Image (cartoon, coloured by chain):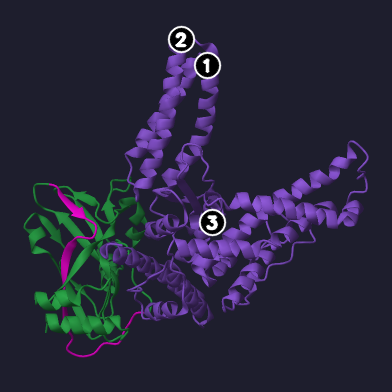
Chain colours: A green, B purple
């Protein structure tokens, strides 16, 4: 079940008090605003670090672990001060982070949805991406402008919503106490054993 | 090429470089402002050069050409510094709190530039750069530019700007001059032992005493400035300053003595002494146990340095009083253990501090956690990874402090 506004406010208050079974959101959103708004989601803001893709001597992205080394060749980091803008042109794509650092206890998972007001202007933000139980860090947002006019993204603006839901059953935390990133990253691609077998047999 | 055209062309090339840099992204307006100031200084010289050319005044052209050469010589390293200040290897989250500290402790409207340097020493450009009078330029080693735990070292560098900006250097110099002269007079026998040629009746050799005294005063002022900066950084960051100090300088070579600097041992001992007065017992750890370097160097130099050190010890209480007054006047919040421990608990839970009031508390909590992590019995790689993760949490906590202050309208 998706958490209601009232339940969200209660769980965030628990997390803020240091209860590891609560939901941590830092900076803390206004709990009154969550309750008063009545929405079953937390509004999150756009952070200040961006990652763009750039042209380089590499010919393509390799979607296997071999391609991880070339990550820096394909990407460029940007920092935008609060209130300043990053202009996303039509057809362009950028990775960003939420301003908020989130930590979910192992009894909750979540999914991210872009603000519909931005979606209607051509800005697509993270298509219902799942956030696993125990996640910690700033959420990486995949933002694309599929519209026809450039759009200003302002560091600190409301950018997406986080819906949180409970789990049917219990998980144990797989991660260490310290994890999470404050900047957007391409992340490491890991090949699974099935793909390795398929690639090997495909050559015969 | 004639002197007029070579000078004109040098200015034109500097414009090209500056204008190219102005097109870049800047994390704070101070970088762009600095570039515009430097450009304006060259425009002023260019106008003078053109006027002299119109008047066919060759003497003036030579004079202005010489000034332009000096300005180009001075500007290029600063332009490099400004370029490096925009590199994403820097932790830009640190700019706001450090600018706030500069605003609170310096007079005028200081502009802070924080950059990463290709030298393994934190340093500050003097605030007296002709064309950038209100700017404070602080550089951290490039390899450590994103390390939040080392940010207390920037406070030491900021201390150098405070030392000049608040006129402490002038009053310290006058006091140290008197104290050194007095010490040399009281220790004349020892002086004569090290300078047997000294003869007050000989027109040449009588100068040995004032020369040695002047050298001692020069060292004393330099030592006093370093100790002031140490105490200033300690006052803002507490224990984390000595931890950062140990990280960057330990174990020290112990092989040479730089006469313009107090020994590492003296510096740590002095901070420990003032911490104790405030009821804080600094950790007695290996990385702060520097070798005593006072026996290094020749006996004459050692004597001159000893006089400098002794004279400085007489003014350290005054330096500390100055710092305490400065921070009170600037309403600077000093670190406290209660908030530090609260942040520490947040970090242990894997979340940033949500209500930090002071940069020092964040960094102190970070160092406490760092010490705990090192003491744990994990795989060294896992612990190193955890320290990297801790840095992320620290930098996010610092950003949260900025966000809270900005949204509270402070």
Determine which residue is flagged by label 1: B60
> What chain does mark 1 sit on?
B
| Picture layout, residue B70 above or below residue A74 | above
Residue B346 visible in the shown view: yes
Same chain under badges 2 and 3? The reply is yes
Q: Position of residue A202 (x, y in %)?
A: 25, 64
The one nearer the camera, B260 or B3, is: B260
Determine which residue is flagged by label 2: B55
Which segment is the magenta one?
Answer: A150-176
| Picture layout, residue A10 above or below residue B56 | below
Same chain under badges 1 and 3? The reply is yes
Determine which of the numbered discs, if any, sits on residue B159 in the image.
3
Same chain under badges 2 and 1? The reply is yes
Q: Is residue A125 magenta?
A: no
Q: Position of residue B72 (x, y in %)?
A: 50, 31
The one nearer the camera, A160 or B315, is: B315
Q: Is residue A159 magenta?
A: yes
Q: Is residue B291 left or right of residue A30?
A: right
Helix, strand or loop at label 3? It is helix
Alpha carbon of mark 2 to alpha carbon of mark 3: how far?
A: 47 Å
């Amino acid at each position: 079940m998706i958490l209601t506004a009232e339940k969200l406010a209660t769980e965030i208050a628990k997390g803020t008090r240091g209860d590891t079974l609560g939901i941590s959101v830092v900076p803390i959103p206004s709990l009154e605003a969550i309750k008063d708004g009545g929405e079953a989601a937390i509004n999150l803001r756009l952070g200040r670090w961006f990652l763009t893709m750039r042209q380089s001597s590499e010919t393509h992205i390799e979607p296997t672990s071999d391609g991880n080394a070339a990550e820096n060749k394909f990407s460029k980091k940007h920092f935008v001060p609060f209130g300043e803008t990053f202009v996303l042109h039509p057809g362009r794509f950028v990775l960003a982070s939420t301003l908020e650092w989130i930590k979910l206890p192992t009894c909750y998972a979540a999914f991210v949805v872009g603000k519909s007001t931005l979606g209607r202007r051509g800005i697509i933000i993270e298509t219902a991406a799942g956030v696993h139980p125990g996640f910690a860090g700033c959420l990486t947002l995949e933002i694309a402008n599929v519209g026809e006019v450039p759009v200003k993204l302002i560091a600190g603006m409301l950018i997406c919503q986080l819906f949180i839901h409970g789990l049917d059953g219990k998980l144990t935390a797989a991660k260490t106490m310290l994890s999470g990133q404050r900047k957007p990253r391409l992340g490491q691609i890991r090949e699974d054993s099935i793909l390795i077998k398929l690639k090997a047999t495909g050559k015969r | 090429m004639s002197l007029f055209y070579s000078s004109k062309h040098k200015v034109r090339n500097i414009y090209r470089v500056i204008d190219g840099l102005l097109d870049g992204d800047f994390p704070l307006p101070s970088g762009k402002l600095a570039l515009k100031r430097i450009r304006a200084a060259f425009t002023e010289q260019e106008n003078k050069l053109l006027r002299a050319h119109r008047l066919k005044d060759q003497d003036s052209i030579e004079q202005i050409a010489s000034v332009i050469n000096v300005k180009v010589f001075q500007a290029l390293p600063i332009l490099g510094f400004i370029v490096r200040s925009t590199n994403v290897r820097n932790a830009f989250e640190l700019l706001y709190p450090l600018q706030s500290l500069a605003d609170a402790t310096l007079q005028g409207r200081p502009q802070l530039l924080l950059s990463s340097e290709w030298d393994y020493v934190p340093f500050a450009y003097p605030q007296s750069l002709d064309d950038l009078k209100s700017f404070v330029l602080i550089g951290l080693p490039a390899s450590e530019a994103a390390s939040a735990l080392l940010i207390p070292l920037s406070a030491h560098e900021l201390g150098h700007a405070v030392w000049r900006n608040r006129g402490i250097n002038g009053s310290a110099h006058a006091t140290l001059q008197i104290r050194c002269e007095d010490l040399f007079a009281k220790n004349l026998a020892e002086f004569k032992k090290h300078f047997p040629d000294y003869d007050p009746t000989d027109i040449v050799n009588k100068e040995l005493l004032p020369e040695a005294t002047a050298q001692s005063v020069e060292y004393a002022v330099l030592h006093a400035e370093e100790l002031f900066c140490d105490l200033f950084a300690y006052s803002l960051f507490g224990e984390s300053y000595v931890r950062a100090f140990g990280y960057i300088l330990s174990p020290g070579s112990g092989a040479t003595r730089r006469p313009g600097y107090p020994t590492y041992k003296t510096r740590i001992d002095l901070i420990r002494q003032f911490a104790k007065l405030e009821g804080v017992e600094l950790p007695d750890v290996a990385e702060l146990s520097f070798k005593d370097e006072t026996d290094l160097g020749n006996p004459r130099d050692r004597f001159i340095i000893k006089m400098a050190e002794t004279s400085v010890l007489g003014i350290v209480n005054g330096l500390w009083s100055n710092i305490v007054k400065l921070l009170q006047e600037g309403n600077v919040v000093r670190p406290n253990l209660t908030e530090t421990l609260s942040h520490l608990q947040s970090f242990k839970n894997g979340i940033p501090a949500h209500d930090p009031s002071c940069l020092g508390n964040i960094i102190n909590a970070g160092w406490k956690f760092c010490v705990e992590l090192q003491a744990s019995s994990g795989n060294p790689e896992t612990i190193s990874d955890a320290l990297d993760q801790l840095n992320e949490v620290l930098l996010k906590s610092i950003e949260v402090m900025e966000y809270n202050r900005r949204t509270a309208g402070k």
